[in-house]
Amino acid sequence: MEKFISFDEIKKSLEKKETDCRAIVNHYLQNIKTKAHLNAFVEVYEHSALQQADLIDQKLVEGKAGKLAGMVIGIKDVLCYADHEANASSKILQGFQSQFTTTAIQRLIDEDAIIIGRLNCDEFGMGSSNENSAHGKVLNALDENRVPGGSSGGSAVAVQANLCTASLGTDTGGSVRQPAAFTGIIGMKPTYSRISRWGLIAYASSFDTIGTFTRTVKDNALLLEIMAGHDEMDSTSSRKPVLPYSQLLHFDKKAKVAYLKESIESHALQPEIKENTLSILEKLKDEGHDVQEVEFPLLEYILPTYYILTTAEASSNLSRFDGVKYGYRTPNAHNLESMYKLTRSEGFGEEVKRRIMLGTFVLSASYYDAYFTKAQKVRRLIKDFTENLLNDFDYIIMPTTPTTAFKFGEHSGDPVAMYLEDLFTVQASVSGVPAISIPNGKDAEGMPIGLQVICNSFKEAELFAFSKYLSDLTS
């Protein structure tokens, strides 16, 4: 069976009866076994995936199959799936089995998607390289000496290496877009609240967003169309109507596009990424679009704001993992206090402990106003500035990442250098607006470059249409 690039190809193959769902699942299972050394999958649901495939094949015969019949999806190891393990790639949730299914996943299953397994990630979604997992690092399929990005590295590599049709990740500060850029695929973070967070193991609740990895914009749009919408189980989920995004991909207007001067002139920006970004901006001008340089004076404050707020939320969210209710419990405790201390010391990895301690510090009585309250005010300034910019312009374009995929160990001894990998992705996360990363060529060593497009809240239809148009321009 040839490699499927898009879900449309799968559907056509099913309609012509050239294949069936069982054969498609077996194709991916074989790929997963062949490429097991990439370490993208933590667990493969071979038995249940084949069972699902057989049921859907029967539905196809009866003409009762859902919109996603034949689509095989991998899920990030922070998303709950009933009667399957979920441990956020952390020792502290070792052996934990979900009692319910994440709303977003359930909506995909209801349309006959097939869930093939759970995917490796940075522990609790904390990292930009997938080096912080209790299950070991994930390898970039294009160069196995390089990182796939993080935290959704396993999700990105699963699609990159053709181990599934699409995958789910989560994006707190760029954890879908950055690995998509590093692996040469499409990664989408929708508007905060567009997809229910019910069933997502929390890192930073006011930032966490479920996102999607695919090879085509249309597949990405289709997944959002099915997962989006209000959920009674998540009071933060939006009640705004969901559009048929996959049917609204035609783009025929002249757009007004901004690009941030500070992102193009950043000293951290790899020259080839700058060159490819400027090249696509020139193509847009040649096509008659209004492309303007704008200044974003708050860029230097975005990362500090993001890390103060997310570490504070992580400190609060992760306090529930204490060895009492579920997951890992130290065998070395001699009283209750030592049980708490040793369980958390032994169960959490270094990066997670670093962020918990930072968050506990900024929430402490002496520093709450100096750091946390001030960061909330700066977040509002960044959000207002971004939204005002998007009221004047249809889209903001910038590089997804300052560099292409770096080598393992290159930044692991320098947390600040690692945090700088999120330099261009955190603006959309702090502001809560949707953003997508699409491929934009390669560097001299053949590693993919990502182009990021941002638009105003709940304008995903326009974002997908413009991104498809850009994809055609860059191909």
Image (cartoon, rainbow, N blue to C red):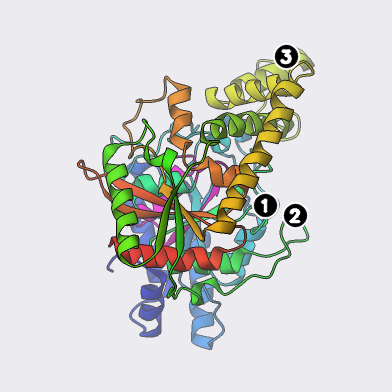
- Picture quadrant where residue 390 is located: bottom right
Q: Is residue 21 visible?
A: yes
Disc nearer the start of the sequence (3/1): 1
For label 1, the SS is loop
Question: Badges 3 and 2: C-beta atoms under 8 Å apart?
Answer: no
For label 2, the SS is loop
The quadrant of the rendering that contains the C terminus is bottom left
Q: CA distance from mark 2 to mark 1?
A: 7 Å
Q: Callout 1: 10 Å neighbours few (<14), some, many (20+)?
A: many
Q: Residue at x 72, y 63 (%)?
A: 230
Q: Which residue is mark 3?
A: 338
Q: Nearer the viewer, residue 42 or 474?
A: 474
Above or below, comparing residue 419 to residue 225 in the picture: above
Q: Which residue is mark 2?
A: 234
Q: Callout 3: 10 Å neighbours few (<14), some, many (20+)?
A: few
Question: Badges 3 and 1: C-beta atoms under 8 Å apart?
Answer: no
**Amino acid type, callout 3:** Ser
Q: CA distance from mark 3 to mark 2?
A: 35 Å
Q: Nearer the viewer, residue 99 or 278?
A: 278
| Residue 343 x/y as whole percent | 66, 22
Residue 151 belongs to the span the image colors magenta: yes
Disc nearer the start of the sequence (3/2): 2
